[in-house]
Amino acid sequence: MKLSRREAIRVSGTAVAGLSMGVSRPNDIVAQTVRQQEWPDHLVEGDLRQRADLPLNPDGSAPEYPPEAADEITGTIWRYTQGKPPEIEYDYRKMAIRLDSRGLARLGGTLRFSDLEGLPRRSYTTLLQCGAPQPTGIVKWTGVRFSDFAEMIEIQSPAHYCRVISHDGYWIDEDISTMMDPQVMLVWLMNDEAIPPINGAPLRLVIPFRYGARSIKAVSEITFGSPGLSMREPPSRG
């Protein structure tokens, strides 16, 4: 039995080690951890997360570097698969991505490489920087803009957010306006070669103006959602 993403955040490293050795059950660990934590009955000062700098342009975009600045990403991690990439099909030419448009786009079903290769191909050399000092690295990404993909499937205006899920179970939600930024890409090449499994083969989302955790590795599913109906225009008061 596996811990959910949110449950995993609530347990200590020692508890997770107990799970990996099969000597503890997930539900017991979560319950025990919650009991051990005494929640204060008043506001207290806590420790702030220490984050590495994420250099951005004044307009909020990510700086782009010359291709010759491209190197490797150091310190890549997989949190939910014991530090190793999930055992999947790594060849981007054989990828099969679940596209759940939920009535918010004309197309849905299984996204394959043949669907993407007809779109304009783009390359950007940008910094991938996580909140911690590592993973980090300036690399050249090649793929397609998410906005071109969204146009291809004919996304509709009621779509408010996009959920991208990795093969290891990690996921993010981003609003549509962020996903439509021209720097946001679906990529299958890294430094002009197929993305290595450790770095997110066969397909990776890249959001260079966000910390690296938002650039989902090994995309397995893309889902669109809308939290509610659009507000009607208020009646004129005359």
Image: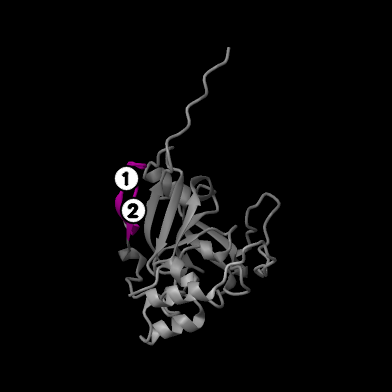
Task: Answer above or below: position of 143 versus 20.
Answer: above
Q: Could you say whether the residue bearing mark 1 is in a helix, strand or loop? A: loop
Q: Left or right? Give the position of 149 relative to 77.
A: left
Q: Please, which colouring scheme is shown?
A: one colour
Name the residue: 49% across, 70% down: 9
Give the residue at the far left of this rendering: 109
Task: Answer above or below: position of 22 versus 106.
Answer: below
* Residue 54 coordinates in the image, percent (x, y): 66, 63
Name the residue: 42% across, 57% down: 164
Magenta extent: 97-113
Count of numbered marks: 2
Q: Quadrant of residue 38?
A: bottom right
Compute the Cα span from label 1 to label 2: 8 Å
- The residue singled out by tag 1 in the image is 107
* Residue 210 coordinates in the image, percent (x, y): 58, 59
1 or 109, which lies in front?
Answer: 1
Q: Left or right? Give the position of 25 relative to 56.
A: left
Q: Quadrant of residue 226?
A: top left
Asked if the residue under mark 2 is in contact with the one under mark 1, i.e. CB atoms within 8 Å, the reply is yes
Specify the amino acid type for callout 2: Leu
Q: Which circle marks residue 22 in the picture?
A: none
Q: Is residue 79 magenta?
A: no
Q: Quadrant of the N terminus?
A: bottom left
Specify the amino acid type for callout 1: Leu
Q: Could you say whether the residue bearing mark 2 is in a helix, strand or loop? A: strand
Q: Quadrant of the C terminus?
A: top right
Q: In this view of the protein, can residue 39 be seen by the observer?
A: yes
* Residue 207 coordinates in the image, percent (x, y): 54, 58
- The residue singled out by tag 2 in the image is 99
Name the residue: 32% across, 71% down: 89
Dot 2 surroundings within 10 Å: few (below 14), some, or many (20 or more)? many
First in sequence: mark 1 or mark 2? Answer: 2
